[in-house]
Amino acid sequence: MANTLLSIQVIPKTPGNENSYAYVDKAIEVIQRSGVKYQVHPLETTMEGELSDLLRIVQDMHEALIEAGSPSVISQIKIAHTPTGISMDTLTEKYRP
């Protein structure tokens, strides 16, 4: 079982003040390629895995956005770390119909 949940909201600056959705899509692509379990929500994406792996993905996301032309990126991150294990399913199953 994974020991960390990490939720991230990327806020990329765009070169011409254009819509940032294309940059957010690129950030989500980095998560998809990583192979970790994740859920996309309207205002953030939550990943499940080992802390060091998830932090590496955050770094990869930032690098991908800079390479895509964003002059700067701010991320808001929430981390829940439990050495004995934690999962999105366990935390949210009581809310599912």
Image (tube, rainbow, N blue to C red):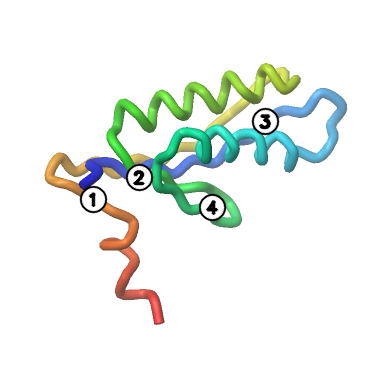
Q: Which residue is mark 2?
A: 48
* Residue type pointed to by label 3: Pro
Q: Is residue 45 above or below residue 15?
A: below
Q: Report helix, strand or loop for mark 4.
A: strand
Give the mark nearest the N terminus, 4 or 3: 3
Q: Quadrant of residue 63?
A: top right
Instruction: Check the image and report above or below for 38 versus 72.
Output: below
Mark 2 closeness class: few <14, some 14–19, many ≥20 residues within 10 Å: many
Categorize mark 3 by other alpha carbons within 10 Å: few (<14), some (14-19), many (20+): many
Counting residues from the start of the chain, the first of labels 4 and 2 encountered is: 4
Q: Nearer the viewer's eye, disc 4 or disc 3?
A: 4
Please give left or right for residue 17 compared with residue 82 in the image: right
**Picture residue at 70% right of the left edge, 34% below the top:** 23
Disc on res. 12: 3
Q: Position of residue 4 (x, y in %)?
A: 28, 41
Side of 91 where 10 appears, left or right: right
Q: Position of residue 74 (x, y in %)?
A: 58, 28
- Residue that badge 1 annotates: 86
Circle 1 crowding by C-alpha within 10 Å: few under 14, some 14–19, many from 20: some
Q: Which residue is mark 4?
A: 40
| Label 4 crowd bin: few (<14), some (14–19), many (20+), radius 10 Å | few
Query: Label 1 amino acid?
Result: Ile
Dot in front, 2 or 3:
2
